[in-house]
Image (cartoon, rainbow, N blue to C red):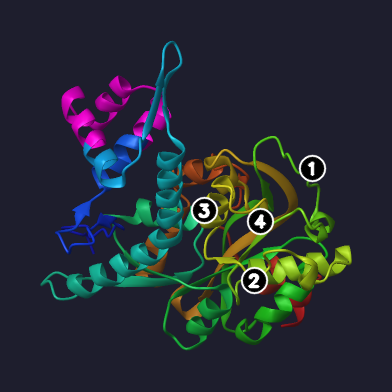
Amino acid sequence: MTYKFRIGLRPQWTLGGEDGSAAVPLQDMLALLAAIDATGNIAGACRACGLSYRHAWGVLRRFEDIFGTQLLITARRQGTQLAPFAQRLLWANRRIEARLMPTLESMASELQEELERLLPESGPHLRLHASHGFAVESLMQHMSGRKPGLELRYRTAIEALASLERHECDLAGFQVPQGEFEAPIMARYAQWLHVDDCLLIHLAVRNAGLFVTAGNPKGIRGMADLARPDVRFVNRQIGSSTRHLVELMLQRAGVTTGQVQGYDTNEFTHMAIAAHIASGMADTGMGVETAACRFGLDFIPLVRERYFFAIRKSALETAAMQGLLSIMRSPDYIGYVGQLAGYDARDTGRLQTLQEAFPSGPGAGI
């Protein structure tokens, strides 16, 4: 189907008074602070936000009065910097966006499809269940306004594969590390992957590893360092494949989960992990290189992961699936995925059987 409209959902801060006064939205102030942080001066921030200098100062002074503290530090020849309170506000907003955006995008996609089905010219669409990732996010953008429609639900790999088996989705995303951890990860997926019924669409290969703050001040080199009492870790949510991979890597390093400070602190996306560390709430966490790059973090590569979409063989020749494959194989999409930090798109869109993808691993015996 061709969308006539596009639904988007975004988180929004509001600030209310103790006296029950009307809540004041903070979005303009937060956007202005982000622009000042990026440009280093108010004039550049005004241009970036499309605001007059007078209006920008009015916004800032209003919220300084509300909060009772300054938001900016201005020094001659040094430009304008955010005060510590403003820095904390900005990082809190980045964490909120990183944590909530996948959920909101999934809800927006669901609502989009529900409304589209009510329109007279509604056509076939595909249902994708997958964990949040940059190639998946980009695919949704490239599919926007094109046929077939693509409805997205963010799920863990096991949830997605179970949905495929129940015919609740048409494509299920899952990632598999290369090397020694491939077999135990594939063993988790085995009951939902059937040689006679499934095909795989290769999405990308990507780098996964530890995020650390710029310059790596704690001198973290690998999983063994997570046992140190001065290292704070932030984990992925229970049930995620990344969390299970962390468990396997800790076992290999001889570290128990009880030794890891912050092991039970959870985030739901690579970007949320990166935001958590960049805001100073943890020293390290596991994720893909792109997220580290976007938050200015250093990256310690530990493993390469292949990311696949599992589909039912019976769906391959449908017009909707062929349309999706055409977009995935387009130079535009492959070029975008290939420029993501830590991503390899050379086999993007390639169809494989389980035996072809895992010729000597557990996939050959599934």
Q: Which residue is mark 3?
A: 271
Badge 2 or badge 1: first in the primary sequence: 1
The span picked out in magenta is 34-61
Q: Which residue is mark 2?
A: 264
Q: Nearer the viewer, mark 3 or mark 2?
A: 2
Return the residue nearer the eye: 50 or 169.
50
Label 4, residues with CA under 10 Å away: few <14, some 14-19, many ≥20? many
Helix or strand or loop: what does disc 1 sit on? loop
Residue 285: quarter of image: bottom right
Q: Which residue is mark 1?
A: 219
Residue 248, x across and y down, in percent: 78, 70
Q: Amino acid under label 3?
A: Met
Q: Which mark is residue 285?
A: 4
Return the residue nearer the eye: 263 or 270.
263
Badge 3 or badge 2: first in the primary sequence: 2
Helix or strand or loop: what does disc 2 sit on? loop
Badge 3 or badge 4: first in the primary sequence: 3
The image shows residue 142, relative to residue 159, as above or below, that is above
Q: Amino acid under label 4?
A: Gly
Within the magenta stretch, is there residue 156?
no
> Which residue occupies 46% across, 38% down?
84
Q: In this view of the protein, can residue 340 be seen by the observer?
A: yes
